[in-house]
Image (cartoon, grey):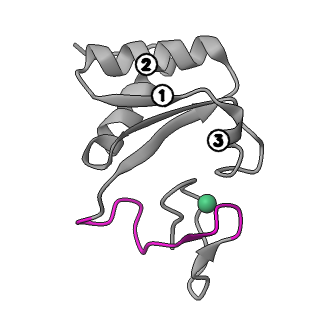
Amino acid sequence: MFCPKCKAEYRAGITRCPDCDEALASSKAPAGQVGPALAWRGNDPVAFSRALAALREHKIQSYQIDDHDQLSHIGAYRPSYGIFVRREDVSRAEKVIRETFAGLIPD
Ligand SMILES: [Zn+2]
């Protein structure tokens, strides 16, 4: 089971994420689920702008949140920045961001 907000994994039998108070899903990207999904979060403003630039480069529509209050409920470590993308783009976005930070951006 996965939390759709913070992507934490829980064992079967748990139905709600204790951090987000969100109903858990059986997969990270359930079919038919709508709304933005969290692609990245963190405290580093440089990483934040690099991740955003990478998503722009790959034409992935993103929604940024840099407001502490809005983010404080989604995770245990109180990140300052978050990037949401359309749910269908989330695995692509996570890959792009991962590759950006690994210095391996494909053309
Ligand atoms: Zn959660």
Label placed on residue 52: 2
Q: Secondary structure at mark 3?
A: helix
Instruction: Please provide the residue range marked out in magenta.
Output: 18-32
Disc 1: which residue: 64
**Mark 1 near ligand 1 (CB under 8 Å)?**
no
Residue, x 42% and y 75% (percent of image)?
26
Residue, x 31% and y 49% (percent of image)?
87
Residue 104 in sight from this viewpoint: no
Task: Give residue 37's position: percent from left, percent from top.
Answer: 41, 47
Pointer 3 with pointer 2, Cβ within 8 A: no
Q: Which callout, 3 or 1, points at the residue further toward the start of the chain? A: 1
Is 19 included in the stretch rendered in magenta?
Answer: yes
Amino acid residing under circle 2:
Leu
Pointer 1 with pointer 2, Cβ within 8 A: yes
Q: Secondary structure at mark 2?
A: helix
Residue, x 36% and y 27% (percent of image)?
96
Q: Quadrant of ligand 1?
A: bottom right
In the image, which is nearer the foreground, mark 1 or mark 2?
Answer: 1
Image position of 2 with respect to 93: above or below:
below
Q: How much space separates mark 3 and mark 1, taking CA atoms?
A: 11 Å
